[in-house]
Image (cartoon, grey):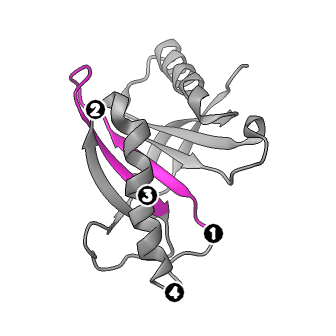
Amino acid sequence: MTVLVDVQIVRPRTLAAVRREVAPAEVVSAWGPAVGKVWDFIRSQPGLWTDGHNIFVYHHSNVPDAPILCEFGVEVTCTFETVAEVYATETPGGEAAVAVHRGPYHRLNEAYAAITEWMAANRREAAGLCWEIYGDPTPDPALTETTVVQLLK
């Protein structure tokens, strides 16, 4: 399946998040417990969430296979005071390469590969931050949408 890459000026999105530093192979097992803490917090704060999505921000190192600083979050309506591990943060704003992945999560690498190929073909560089915006789950994983955003230098 061909994944299209679009250049967009993205705006910051306010998140409630929990931060974890994990090895690249451990992201799959780290996100569930972390975002669970965020949802527990959001449920205790009326009005903080309306219809925002899960958004996971990755701060990549320049060192191959180095741990990744991850912010596992949920889009919320406003900032708030930190409670335990849950804190307010934002996705960055600026120029980004954006790809929409349609299908199961284990194939998200196709969107990342498309962005990497696009950057090489267009002589663009990553700024070290990317994030995934998870669409609403569907009964058929082939119809699930996840937007991958790569901030550009």
Residue 129 visible in the displayed image: no
The correct choice, above or below, for 52 with respect to 26 in the image is below
The number of numbered discs placed on residues in the rendered structure image is 4
**Picture quarter with the C terminus:** top left
Of 77 and 108, the residue lying toward us: 108
Region in magenta: 52-74
Drawn side of residue 13 relative to residue 104, left or right: left
Query: How crowded is the residue under tag 4: few (<14 C-alpha within 10 Å), some, or many (20+)?
Result: few
- Measure the alpha-carbon separation of dots 3 and 2: 17 Å
Q: What label sits on residue 35 in the rendered view? A: 3
Read off the residue under disc 4.
Answer: 46
Q: Sequence-wise, which precedes: disc 1 or disc 4?
A: 4
- Element assignment for label 4: loop
Residue at 67% of width from left, 27% of height from top?
4
Residue at 66% of width from left, 34% of height from top?
104
Kindly identify the amino acid type of the residue bearing the numbered disc 1.
Answer: Asp
Residue 145 visible in the displayed image: yes
Q: Sequence-wise, which precedes: disc 3 or disc 2?
A: 2
Q: Sequence-wise, which precedes: disc 3 or disc 4?
A: 3
Read off the residue under disc 1.
Answer: 51
Kindly identify the amino acid type of the residue bearing the numbered disc 2.
Answer: Ala
- Measure the alpha-carbon separation of dots 2 and 1: 30 Å
Q: What label sits on residue 23 in the rendered view? A: 2
Residue at 33% of width from left, 45% of height from top?
70
Q: Nearer the viewer, mark 3 or mark 4?
A: 3
Q: Sequence-wise, which precedes: disc 1 or disc 3?
A: 3
- Measure the alpha-carbon separation of dots 1 and 4: 13 Å
Badge 2 vs badge 1, beta-carbon distance below 8 Å: no
Q: Sequence-wise, which precedes: disc 4 or disc 2?
A: 2
- Measure the alpha-carbon separation of dots 3 and 4: 18 Å
Kindly identify the amino acid type of the residue bearing the numbered disc 4.
Answer: Pro
